Image: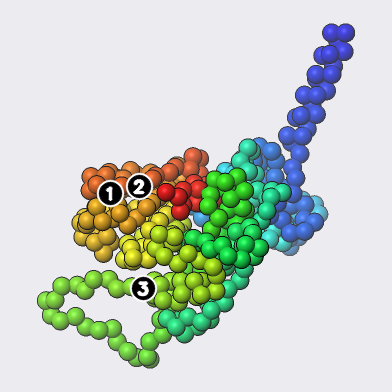
Amino acid sequence: MQIKWVVMLAAAGWALAQAADTAVPAASNVMNAQYPAVFADGRATFRLRAPNAARVQLQPGGSDNGLGLQPYDLVKGADGVWTVTIPPAVPGFHYYWFLVDGVQVNDPGSQTFFGWARDTSGIEIPSPGEDFYATRDIPHGQVRMEWYLSKTTGQTRRALVYTPPGYDQEARARYPVLYLQHGAGENETGWTRQGRANFILDNLIASRQAVPMIVVMDHGYATAPTAPGTPPPAAAPGAPAAPQGPTAFERVVLTDLIPVIDARYRTRGDRDHRAMAGLSMGSGQTLQITTRNLDSFSWIGLFSGAAPAGDLGTAYSGAFANAADFNKRVHLLWIGAGSAEARLMTAIPAARSLLDARGIKNVVTFTSEGTSHEWQTWRRCLREFAAKLFKS
């Protein structure tokens, strides 16, 4: 009997080992593509057919990418297919591309995602036990395309708008609004495609962790037209530098986007029910726009980017100069980043110290453990931030 149990246990152990060593197609693949393939421990195998190439490399997208820091060399098989299996990657979404004899090539097995200012390949590495951005059998909101003419730029622009579950059925309900911005080199599709923001909100709302809200994601670049040959205005000799005025994107948000959203959707259009947040570049835009316009926003989220610094008595359009006024008007100033973002792991505590010393309240800081300047950080930031919005 003992021998039988030993044999059975050995067989079970072998089966588990085999399962752990079996890769499955990544969720980010195009239909029916078997590669890239992901192992349970986070390793991933990539393949590319390039029989005439002399060298093929896998290039992770950026220095803060959870796939690795350096290109990986693929090995050529007799069939002309190049292959590499990389070490365990950080869970979440990562950009990448191939270098075929030095030329950037997207992976035909991967969907493309707009990042690095172009469509590029991406891979989803599962995170064991972390399903807050999974697609569940619950009521789902909708992501709508909203086109509008911007008076600031003279061009037609597109925003993506998430409406919460039940929006069309509950015709009298009105909702608070979160304006949510992407990072540099990305566009308005990033938060729903790479960030899975709609599923994060669906899950939070279904579990009653978040208030049902509308989320607006706009293109973070804007240029105001100028007359050909018009020089910039010259400052008078010896005059102090003029305070920085609103950027074209700030004018788009305040004078174009918000009025359009308030007119076309059932919003609660006052400052107490309006938030803005962004990642990286979008974080900087958020800090500038909200502090210059505290009459329009009362909830602020900064993900992996801006952190208040310098003389808070004069910086940021004087928003922090009067702590009592700021505390009354801003219900939440939320600042988060990944634990592997070394600069921000120093800057955020320093910002918190400055804010505390000035008497600024309603500040929350957050660290995403084990992640860097990448989408898993920002997914976690959105989950934590959205769960606190529009609550007493």
Give the amino acid type for the residue marked by disc 1 in the picture.
Answer: Ile
Using the rendered view, name the quadrant where residue 313 is placed. Answer: bottom left
Camera-side residue of 283 and 331 = 331
Q: Residue at x 86, y 10 (%)?
A: 3
For the residues labelled 1 and 2, the Cα–Cα distance comes to 7 Å
- Would residue 82 be found to the left or right of residue 371 on screen? right
Which x, y percent locates residue 83?
A: 71, 50
Using the rendered view, name the quadrant where residue 254 is placed. Answer: bottom left
Residue for badge 3: 247
Dot 2 or dot 3, earlier in sequence: 3
Compared with 321, 357 (above or below) is above
Q: Nearer the viewer, mark 2 or mark 3?
A: 2
Q: Which mark is residue 82?
A: none
Dot 1 or dot 3, earlier in sequence: 3
Q: Is residue 162 visible?
A: no
Q: Is residue 10 visible?
A: yes
Give the amino acid type for the residue marked by disc 2 in the picture.
Answer: Val
> Could you say whether the residue bearing mark 2 is in a helix, strand or loop?
strand
Q: Which mark is residue 363?
A: 2
Q: Residues within 10 Å of mark 1 (few under 14, many from 20)?
A: many
Q: Which mark is residue 360?
A: 1
Camera-side residue of 80 and 110 = 110
